[in-house]
């Protein structure tokens, strides 16, 4: 464990943090452990998948583990359950439902890290799968939440898209536009203080998230002088949350805009409006699911930035409607409160 963590394994409060500030990506505690371990776990996952070693694949996960093979998550409760009935995109046994042809082999195309903080990282992986005759069968693209649960790094949540060779290069502009529109509408809902706009971006059904960060709770903790409260590691068994949302649940949501406005501006000033992250982009897309690198920038009324966050999210098309289907939490990339002069 590095110098940025205490004896219990929890991240230590960074030196120089503003009294009202949140830790952000300028501090080594955000990346010293999460970035190398996230890349290591993803490399081990690819190696296990390429070797068609089911037990080694199983060792890469935290349990319960959730996987979006389609537009709703499949939850695997234990390692034994995974070995007994692996999801079809990870079933290397040759028995039962599987998306992996016998005799095929995999070539690693890329591993990319998108978000990170003291307790985890969100990464993407792409591989090309070839048949025994050497011809490309398909491309596998996924996003993964790698988390530190009680000192162990593993994959808690994943979503995958498999594109057959014949469909490579096909674009899905309606899917990509819907996913980006969802991000803009989510921010617009806060700017307008309009719960109905927020609700319009959500989907009924099963959703899963991996708790890399709750932006509101982290903001509230920072404003009350406990900025590391949202980054506990010791004793954490799981960061997975799975919910069965009904339309009634969505309609009953309450964003508590007055509380949000009080916390969101930090020490910079009163929060007024939010925009979707200008650098937001589609990572992978198919006809009914999109992986998106996104986030948002918050401002005061006179245009001063208060914070910038990044996230990885999953948008899906279910029952004739696009909306949010899950995500990996939010990374505080830049809290401008920490750029303010400190009172002596």
Image (tube, grey):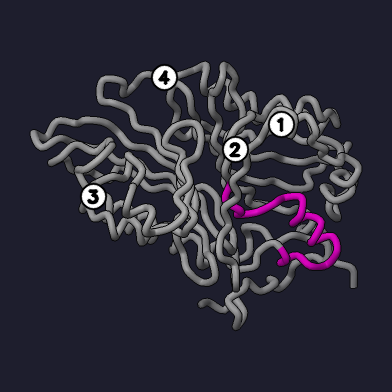
> For the residues marked 1 and 2, what is the alpha-carbon distance in whole angstroms?
11 Å
Q: Earlier in the sequence, mark 1 or mark 4?
A: 4
Q: Earlier in the sequence, mark 4 or mark 3?
A: 3
Residue occupied by mark 2: 294
Q: 320 or 152: nearer the eye?
A: 320
Residue occupied by mark 4: 171
Q: Earlier in the sequence, mark 2 or mark 3?
A: 3
Q: Residue furthest bottom?
A: 7
**Dividing the picture into quarters, in which one does residue 287 lie?**
top left
Count of marks overlaid on the render: 4
> For the residues marked 4 and 3, what is the alpha-carbon distance in whole angstroms?
27 Å
The reply to whether dot 1 and dot 2 touch (C-beta < 8 Å) is no
Helix, strand or loop at mark 3:
helix
> For the residues marked 1 and 4, what is the alpha-carbon distance in whole angstroms?
24 Å
Q: 206 or 21: nearer the eye?
A: 206
- Magenta residue check for 217: yes
- The residue sitting at 66% across, 46% down in the picture is 309
The reply to whether dot 4 and dot 2 touch (C-beta < 8 Å) is no
**Which disc number belongs to residue 135?**
none
The part of the chain drawn in magenta is 209-229
The reply to whether dot 1 and dot 4 touch (C-beta < 8 Å) is no
Q: Earlier in the sequence, mark 1 or mark 2?
A: 1
């Amino acid at each position: 464990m590095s110098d940025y963590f205490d004896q219990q394994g929890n991240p230590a409060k960074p030196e120089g943090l503003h009294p009202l500030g949140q830790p952000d990506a300028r501090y080594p505690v955000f990346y010293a452990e999460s970035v190398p371990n996230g890349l290591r776990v993803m490399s081990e996952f690819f190696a296990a998948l390429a070797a068609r070693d089911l037990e080694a694949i199983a060792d890469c996960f935290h349990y319960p583990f959730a996987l979006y093979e389609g537009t709703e998550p499949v939850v695997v409760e234990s390692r034994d359950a995974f070995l007994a009935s692996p999801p079809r995109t990870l079933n290397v046994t040759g028995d039962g439902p599987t998306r992996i042809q016998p005799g095929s082999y995999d070539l690693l195309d890329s591993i990319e890290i998108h978000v990170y903080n003291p307790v985890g990282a969100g990464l993407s992986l792409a591989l090309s799968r070839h048949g025994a005759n050497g011809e490309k069968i398909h491309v596998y693209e996924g996003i993964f939440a790698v988390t530190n649960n009680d000192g162990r790094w593993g994959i808690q949540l994943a979503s995958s898209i498999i594109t057959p060779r014949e469909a490579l290069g096909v674009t899905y502009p309606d899917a990509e536009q819907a996913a980006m529109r969802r991000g803009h509408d989510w921010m617009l809902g806060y700017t307008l203080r309009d719960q109905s706009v927020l609700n319009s971006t959500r989907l009924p059904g099963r959703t899963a998230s991996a708790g890399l960060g709750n932006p509101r709770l982290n903001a509230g903790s920072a404003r009350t002088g406990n900025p590391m409260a949202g980054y506990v590691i010791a004793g954490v068994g799981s960061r997975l949350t799975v919910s069965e949302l009904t339309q009634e649940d969505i309609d009953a949501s309450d964003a508590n805009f007055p509380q949000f406005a009080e916390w969101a501006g930090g020490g910079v000033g009163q929060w007024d409006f939010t925009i979707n992250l200008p650098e937001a982009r589609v990572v992978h897309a198919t006809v009914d699911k999109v992986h998106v690198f996104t986030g948002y920038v918050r401002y005061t009324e006179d245009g001063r930035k208060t914070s910038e966050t990044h996230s990885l999210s999953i948008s899906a098309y279910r029952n004739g409607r696009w909306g949010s289907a899950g995500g990996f939490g939010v990374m505080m990339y830049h809290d401008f409160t920490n750029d303010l002069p400190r009172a002596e």
